[in-house]
Amino acid sequence: MLFDLMPKRRRKDLYDFEDEMRALMDAYAGGRLVVITALRRMGKTSLLLTSLNEGKLPYVFLDARRVVGTPGVRGLAEELERGVNEFVASRSPVSVRFLELLRGVRGVDVDLARPSVSVHWGRKDRVDVATALERLDEAARGAGTRIVVALDEAQELRAAAPWLPRLLAYAYDHLEGIVLAISGSQVGVLRDFLGIDDPHGALYGRFLHEVRLRRLSREEALDFLRRGFSEVEVTPSEGVLQEAVEHFDGIIGWLAYFGWSYSRGMGDVGSILDMAARQEAEELRGFLSRSLAARRYRAILRAATRGPASWSSLKGAVEAEDGVEMDPHNFNELLQRLVKMGFLEREGNGLYVFADRVLATAAAKYL
C-alpha cells in the first residue's frame, strides 16, 4: 500500500524509483561500498529495505536510530544482537555457517539450538565487532556469495561508535565477501562522519556508489496521491490534491502521511499539515536542546521562515538577537551545520531556504 507509513519492503509497494533501485542492485552485484543519501522522509529506508529483499544477496540490517539515546555502547550492542538474530533466523546456509563461526568470538554467546546470539557490551567482555565481521566474511566466501551489511541512518552512530569509519575501511580493504550499504538523511553530517571528502578520513579515496533520492515532481506527486487514494477507495477533490502537493511538496513520506491521515478522516489539508509540522518541531527542538548555540540557531531558522534568505540577512538576524557583531567564520559554521543537518538548503542563486515546506511551517509556528 502506497500510504502505509511503515518502511516498504516489497517492490509493488514502492512508488517508482526504478532507476535508483537498478543502481542499488548493480552496486550490490559489483561494488563494495554503497552510500544512499536523501532528505528526511524521501523514502530512503524503504528503498534500502526493498532493494535488500528484492536482491539475491543475504544481508544484515542495522537501524542506527534505535541506538540514539541509549548510554555508551549498550544501544549499539543491542542493535547488533537484533540485526544478527534476524539474519540467523533465516536459517540460510550462510547464516548457519556464520552462527557456527561466531563461537569463540569475544562478547558473543551462541545458541545453536534456537538459533540465536547474545551480544555483551560490558568493558571486560565487550563484543569484538571486527572479528565478528571477519567471521561473516568467511561464511559468505565459503558459500560462494557475498553479504550486504546495511547501516540505516549511520550518522546517528557518531557518538556511540566514533571508531566505525575505521572499521568500515578495514572491511572495505580486506573483507571481500562483504558489501557495505550505508544510508543517511543528514547528508553533510554523514559525509563528515565517514570522512568521504576528508583526505585524512578513514574512507577517503575508496570507490563508492552513491545513490541520491530525489523529490517527486509535481506531476509525480499528484499521481502518487491519486494511486494511493485509489488503493484505499477514497476520492478527494482535485482541489484537495493540488493543495496537498502545494504544502507537502515532492517529499514522498509527507505525501504518504497526508494520504494515510486524510483517508482516515483525520482532518483537512491544513490540519494534517499542522500535525506534520508539530512532528518536525520536535525534531528541531531536539537539535536545539543539544546545542550550546541554540539561541543563535533559532534566530537563523526564524529568519529563514520569511522566505529565501541571503547569507548576510541571516547573519544580521543573529546579530540582532545578540546585540553585537558576529565573526563571519563563526556564523558560517552555524549556518553550514544547519545545512549539513538537512534543515536548510542553499539554492543555486546562493539563497538559503528550508529543506521542505513542513519544516518551514514547523519553524514558523512552533519554534
Image (spheres, grey):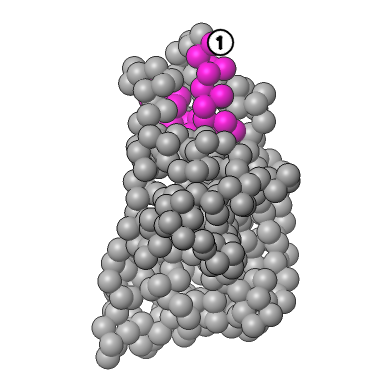
Which SS type dominates the magenta stretch? helix
Residue toward you, 125 or 39: 39
Magenta residue span:
238-264
Residue 227 visible at all: no
Q: Nearer the viewer, residue 188 or 166?
A: 188
Where in the figure is residue 148, as x and y percent of width and height? 56, 65
Q: Residue furthest bottom?
A: 124
Query: Where residue 66 appears, x then y in whole percent?
Result: 35, 59
Residue behind mark 1: 238
At x 68% / y 41%, what residue is drawn?
Answer: 18
User: Of helix, strand and loop, which one carries label 1?
Assistant: helix
Q: Position of residue 268 (x, y in %)?
A: 39, 17
Image point (50%, 38%), residue name: 305
Looking at the rendered structure, the kind of residue marked 1 is Glu
Q: Is residue 33 left or right of residue 243?
A: right
- Residue 90: quarter of image: bottom left
